[in-house]
Image: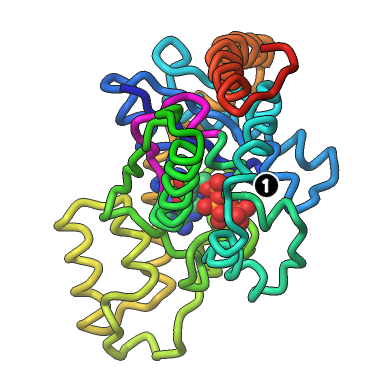
Amino acid sequence: MRSLSGIQPSGILHIGNYFGAIKQFIDLQDEYEGFYFLADFHALTSLPDSESLKHNTMSAILDYLACGLDPEKSTLFLQSDVPEHTELSWILSNVTPIGLLERGHSYKDKVSKGIKPNTGLFTYPVLMAADILIYDSDIVPVGKDQKQHLEMTRDIAIKFNEHYNKEVFKLPEEKILETLAVVPGIDGEKMSKSYKNIINMFLPEKELKKQVMSIVTDSTPLEEPKNPDNNITKLYSLFASKEEIQAMKDNFTNGNYGYGHGKTELYNKILEYFAPYRKKREELENNMDYVEKILKKGAEKARDIASKKVSEVRKTVGLMGRN
Ligand code: AQP
């Protein structure tokens, strides 16, 4: 059984990407044949400058490896090393109704937040369908925000299979950990690279503390009781034990416990949780040749599988070029 997923290097990865995606990749790596990539073609939809894209791509691959993705167990690669993804995306776009894309929540959310839409952003779900279908993936571990994109992937696969009257594509299932489905950002909205509300686990300690201290709260005075289900406890729950979570909630309910106290406890937990990964990441940063080798090997394996699938698709649709 195959598991596949990707993250766009459209910024520095954050704890939402970790709990929604990377942690699942790692938890699944003994059970599934894993294919995990960095969606750098997708990241182009936000038109990053080339230096930022390069920097964010390498930073994200370091995050994957530092957090425990094992290149001996899973295939790690860059999307742009497998150009067959874009070829398949073009072919799939022809069985994708415009109306399907117009209903995209992620697209509509981004536009409503003032992001100027380009064609790439609009057709993002088609490239994502190609990413998934090209490897005959069985499951796709993602955060809840991606649920609709997985539904679209299945719709596109069904339309293709029906149109050509052949079971070319397997229908993949999303794998969402309900407890970690949507990690809130410092403003309480979904934590998202493009919303500037993130906590980056590998920032230098001082900057990390600054991000945690910026979590938005109300102005209830220190001595008064506060809502125990606030944004700080929600984030703290990702790292703490049941007893610790209850203790923080009780502190907020009883009063004489300020938001600043809660933020400091949260900051300490984040540091403690990521400490071993931070150390490994520093080691990897000094061993970029090793990282490059992993990407090269991963790309070769991924491309071998992807090119076979695209060849099958080309034959199916009647393209006469190199089949
Ligand atoms: N806040 C989140 N909670 C849980 N899971 C999350 N993911 C992202 N944010 C959260 C999961 O991370 C994976 C990679 O996402 P992506 O980079 O492909 O796109 P995204 O979901 O749109 O992530 P961002 O950070 O919000 O990126 P931008 O702002 O660039 O679009 C996915 O599995 C996602 O569910």
Check disc 1: other Cα within 10 Å, few if <14, some if 14-19, many if 20+: many
Relative to 116, is 169 above or below? above
Identify the residue at image location x=67%, y=70%: 111
Report whether 150 appears left or right of 308.
left
Residue type, mark 1 in image: Ser
Q: How is the image coloured?
A: rainbow
Which residue is nearer to you in this view: 153 or 303?
153
Counting labels gives: 1
Which residue is nearer to you in this view: 116 or 322?
322
Q: Is residue 291 magenta?
A: no
Identify the residue at image location x=67%, y=48%: 11
Identify the residue at image location x=46%, y=89%: 219
Residue 121 visible to an observer of this rendering: yes
- Residue 183 falls in image quadrant: bottom left
What range is drawn magenta here? 131-142
Residue 181 x/y as whole percent: 35, 55
Residue 13 x/y as whole percent: 57, 45
Residue beneath label 1, please?
A: 10
Relative to 48, is 97 above or below? below
Q: Which quarter of the rendering shows the N terminus?
A: top left
Ligand 1 under 8 Å from disc 1 Cβ? yes
Q: Is residue 137 magenta?
A: yes
Identify the residue at image location x=40%, y=75%: 259
